[in-house]
Amino acid sequence: MKPKVMVSPGVRDDNPGLLEEKLSDIAEVVYGTFRDPKNIPSDIKDSEAMILALEPINDEVLDNFPKLKIIARYGVGYDTVDVNACTKRGIYVTHTPGILSHAVAELTIGLMLCLSRALIEADRYVRTEWAGPKGSRLKMGIDLYGKTLGIIGLGRIGYEVAVRARSFGMKIIYYDVERKYEAEKTLGAQYVDLETLLRESDFVSIHVPLTPQTRRLIGEKELRMMKPTAYLINTSRGAVVDEEALCRALKEGWIAGAGLDVFVKEPLPLDSPLIGMRNVVLSPHIGTYTVETRRSMALMCIENVRAALMGMVPPNLVPEQRGMVFKRGAFS
Ligand code: GLV
């Protein structure tokens, strides 16, 4: 019998037929998902590998999967996976870094342009007002050229955002837990502390992973440091921002607006105050949602799963597991 690989249905929907084409010589692909550890479908419990969207993984969930060798996260962020719990059991955790950075960076720039040129409003205006009798005026935009972009987290994605913003003639400042000397040289990016970044930026863009240290990194105090003309862009994880404080900031004009691809709760509930706000642009967590990038992500997951099922170390282990070798079965 071939080992079973459980795949989130969203991964199949993005890449019809690909999982079967690339895995069925060595594995049986089964589509399934779960949210609640008490309600895991019985036909996936004997899976030896998983390719996962954002299903939560913790000890209670893992108790249901005694044969599991690898969790391949379909994405770069792995805040939904308790890596320690996996390591204790000898289960590899992989993710898909690098190949998706340009897609997230493109969306980030897209959100900035939507805000700077009021593009969503402009579209609505053409459809409903431009040729109408009232002759109302559309809100005038602002240039990106000459503005300061503050990047929080100059990792792979932050770097790609900076490259693109430079080509628009923006000044780049950044804050990170580590200085990025190479990027300072190649991009002319200037390292500043978080407070300076918040006070000086016209656009603040967040590119950090969600960790205990970054949860609610941007709260009321930080939002009040921003200029009233500044915009916040978040394509990382919703919980990096205190969403209630952000709603107050947007309503009371502490900042000019926000471009948000990620939210504390997803899908964003329809009764969220953000839904009714005109100074925000919202997208449904689509940073990596392009044909090319989703295919590359799926192929990377497949490569990791194939390696683990064949008894090798998968190439894209999360940093916490780099250098580790597990032999599940022999291990437990
Ligand atoms: C998307 O959210 C990812 O983690 O890649």
Image (cartoon, rainbow, N blue to C red):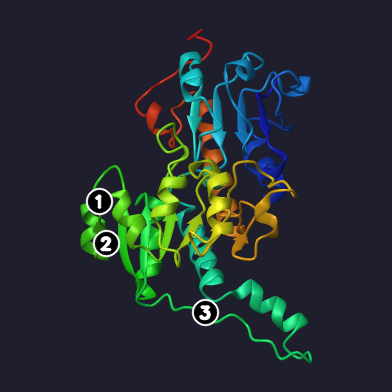
In this view, 27 is above or below 248 = above
Q: Residue furthest front?
A: 252
Answer yes or no: do the residues labelled 3 and 2 have beta carbons within 8 Å? no
Instruction: Indicate the quadrant where residue 3 lies.
Output: top right
Instruction: Indicate the quadrant where residue 166 lies.
Output: bottom left
Q: Bin the neighbour count of mark 3 within 10 Å (Cα to Cα): few under 14, some 14-19, many 20 and up.
A: few
* Residue at the image point whose x is 44% and y is 79% from the top: 143
Instruction: Indicate the quadrant where residue 316 lies.
Output: top left
Reading the image, the residue beneath label 2 is 189
Return the mark for residue 180: 1
In this view, 326 is above or below 30 = above
Sequence order check, earlier mark of 3 and 2: 3
Q: Amino acid at mark 3?
A: Gly
Return the mark for residue 141: 3
Q: Amino acid at mark 2?
A: Ala
Q: Position of residue 242 (x, y in %)?
A: 52, 43
Answer yes or no: do the residues labelled 1 and 3 have beta carbons within 8 Å? no
Q: For the residue labelled by badge 3, is the local secondary structure a helix, a strand or a loop?
A: loop
Decide if ligand 1 comes within 8 Å of the CB at mark 3: no
Q: Position of residue 82 (x, y in %)?
A: 51, 25
Rounded to the nearest angstrom, the CA distance separating label 1 from label 3 is: 33 Å
Decide if ligand 1 comes within 8 Å of the CB at mark 1: no
Q: Position of residue 67 (x, y in %)?
A: 61, 16
